[in-house]
Every structure is written in structure tokens, then in C-alpha cells.
């Protein structure tokens, strides 16, 4: 599990594909459109697990996404894509590939965890693999450890149909991989609720770990409003101002 001594919650750069010209064989839309559906499904899992994120925009490119990420600090750069077979082999391939940059220990570890989790739901688990590469800019150029995951082949009808029917399941497995990577407890999403801190005295500690020994990130005053995104054994995952962490649920009225 996550080290209790860490002072802040993790943050990732989320980069769904910006390739609006790559169309799904089913006619559902482009790779950009569908990978943004996956990113939309992933966001509630990030929030419920205390993983902060910044997300690119559809009018950006892979290059501008990397440049944007490199202006800040992120614990992981995660690019979401679906694959396509080369000319002459249209529709022939299936599978999932998680790419990482050779020599990036953390990038490789994140890729391996993603593959482990996606194997549990993909119909051809032996075709879910990792691969190192120096050619993909989204794993070569970010300052942060990076993974580009090609989830299925959108020119293969079976893969495209599987993708379109499993956005939430894929998002959940990606989130499980991320929580393992960061050493967090996996928490299912809940509808966000507004809570009010209720204390007889003092302040409520917002911590980096769901334990009284977790590092204090911030102190929340009595009567303060917070947003609750998840719950783990008597601890809420709380957003308070610009802070994210765990707070004792007993002192928050919802």
C-alpha cells in the first residue's frame, strides 16, 4: 500500500487520443471521440481514489499535450489510444499493448500493472502485452514516467464492439492499476456529496493516508464545506479548496 510518509496525493496527466481522423469500423465515431468517452468514465474513479489529474483537450495534439504536461509536475503521464492495423492488414489484428520508454523503471512498472488489470476483462488475455519503444513521442518526451496504452484495434469489428460496450469496466481496471502503482486502496466511485466539518474544538486533519498516522496535508476548520468523493473504512476521500486527501468521516456531516 501507499507509503504513509508521502505528503501529497498523486497527480497524473491524462491524455486521451486527439486523432479525430481515425474512425471506428462500427461507425460510432473517431478514436478521439471514443478515447474521450473512456477518459470520461475514468475521471470518477480518479476522484474517488484521491488521484488528482489534468486532462488534455480535443483541439490539442499529442505534441502539445506533452508540452503542456512538461510545464508542470506529474507522477505519471497516461495516454489513452486504440490501435489500427497497417495498410493491407485492415481488421486483422486484435489485442492491447501498453508502451513505455526503455530504461524508465516506473513507466515499465505502470505499463505492467495496466496490462495485468486489463487481462482480467479482455476476451483474449494472451494478446494483452507490454512493449518498450523509442518512437512514440508520448512515452519518449514527457518528463514524468509515461505509458501509452493502445486498447484494442478500432479497425477490427470485434474489438471495436468490445470497447464500446466496456468503457466503465476498462476505466475501472485502469484505476485499479493506478491505485496499485501509487499504493492506494481502491475505492469505488460514489456520487459526490457536499459535507460540513463538525467539530467540538480544533481543526480536522486532511491526511495523505487513511490513518491517524498519515501525513497532514491541510487543517480544515469547523463549519468548512468539503466535497466527498469516496469512503474507505471510516475515512472519506475529500476535496477541500485545492487540497485532496483523507479525512475522518465521523467529523463530516453529509
Image (spheres, rainbow, N blue to C red):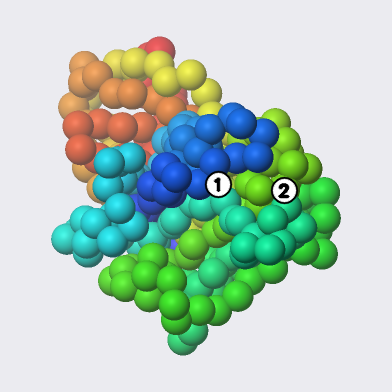
Query: Helix, strand, or loop for circle 2?
Result: loop
Of the numbered discs 2 and 1, the one sitting upstream in the chain is 2
In which image quadrant can residue 158 be found? Answer: top right
Taking depth in this image into account, of 171 and 139 the one nearest to the observer is 139
Q: What element carries label 1?
A: helix
- Which of 8/64 is in front? 64
Which quarter of the rendered picture does the N terminus lie within? Answer: bottom right
Q: Residue at x 44, y 56 (%)?
A: 79
Up the image or down, 199 lies above or below 33; here it is above
Does residue 61 lie above or below 146 as drawn? above
Frontmost residue, 159 versus 171? 159
Q: Which residue is drawn at 82% across and 64% down?
A: 126
Residue 195 rendering spot, x and y as whole percentages: 34, 17
Name the side, left or right, on which 134 lies relative to 156.
Answer: left
Q: Could you say which disc has been placed on residue 156 in the image? A: 2
Q: Is residue 20 above or below residue 68?
A: above
State whether residue 134 appears in this view.
Answer: yes
Q: Are marks 2 and 1 in contact (CB under 8 Å)?
A: no
Q: Residues within 10 Å of mark 2 (few under 14, many from 20)?
A: many
Please name whichever residue, 187 or 112, is drawn nearer the observer in this view of the structure: 112
Name the residue: 42% across, 42% down: 20
Q: How many marks?
A: 2
Label 1 environment density (alpha carbons within 10 Å; few <14, some 14–19, many ≥20): many
- Figure quadrant of residue 189: top right
List x then y, in percent, for residue 134: 45, 81
Mark 2 vs mark 1, CA separation in Å = 25 Å
Image coordinates for residue 94, horizontal then vertical, percent: 74, 56
Residue labelled with disc 1:
175
Tell me if 17 is positioned left or right of 118 in this view.
left
Residue 121 in the figure: left or right of residue 239: right
Decide if residue 39 is in sight here.
no
Residue 245, position as x, y percentages in the image: 35, 41
Amino acid at each position: 500500500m501507499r507509503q504513509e510518509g508521502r505528503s501529497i496525493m498523486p497527480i497524473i496527466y491524462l491524455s486521451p487520443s486527439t486523432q479525430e481522423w481515425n474512425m471506428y469500423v462500427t461507425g460510432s465515431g473517431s478514436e478521439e471521440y471514443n478515447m474521450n468517452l473512456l477518459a470520461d468514465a475514468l475521471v470518477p474513479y480518479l476522484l474517488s481514489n484521491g488521484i488528482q489529474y489534468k486532462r488534455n483537450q480535443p483541439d490539442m495534439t499529442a505534441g502539445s499535450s506533452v508540452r503542456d504536461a512538461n510545464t508542470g509536475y506529474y507522477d505519471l503521464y497516461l495516454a489513452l489510444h486504440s490501435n489500427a492495423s497497417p495498410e493491407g492488414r485492415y481488421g486483422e489484428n486484435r489485442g492491447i499493448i501498453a508502451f513505455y520508454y526503455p530504461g524508465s523503471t516506473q513507466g515499465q512498472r505502470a505499463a505492467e500493472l495496466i496490462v495485468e488489470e486489463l487481462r482480467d476483462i479482455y476476451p483474449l488475455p494472451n494478446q494483452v502485452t507490454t512493449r518498450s519503444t523509442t518512437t512514440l513521442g508520448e512515452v519518449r518526451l514527457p518528463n514524468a514516467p509515461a505509458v501509452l496504452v493502445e486498447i484494442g484495434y478500432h479497425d477490427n469489428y470485434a474489438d471495436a464492439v468490445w470497447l464500446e460496450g466496456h468503457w466503465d469496466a476498462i476505466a475501472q481496471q485502469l484505476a485499479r492499476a493506478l491505485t496499485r502503482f501509487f499504493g492506494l486502496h481502491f475505492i469505488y466511485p460514489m456520487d459526490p456529496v457536499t459535507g460540513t466539518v463538525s467539530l467540538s474544538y480544533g481543526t480536522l486533519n486532511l491526511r495523505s493516508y487513511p490513518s491517524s498516522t498519515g501525513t497532514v496535508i491541510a487543517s480544515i476548520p469547523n463549519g468548512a464545506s468539503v466535497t466527498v468523493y469516496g469512503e474507505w473504512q471510516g475515512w472519506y476521500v475529500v476535496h477541500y479548496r485545492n487540497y485532496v486527501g483523507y479525512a475522518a468521516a465521523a467529523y463530516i456531516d453529509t
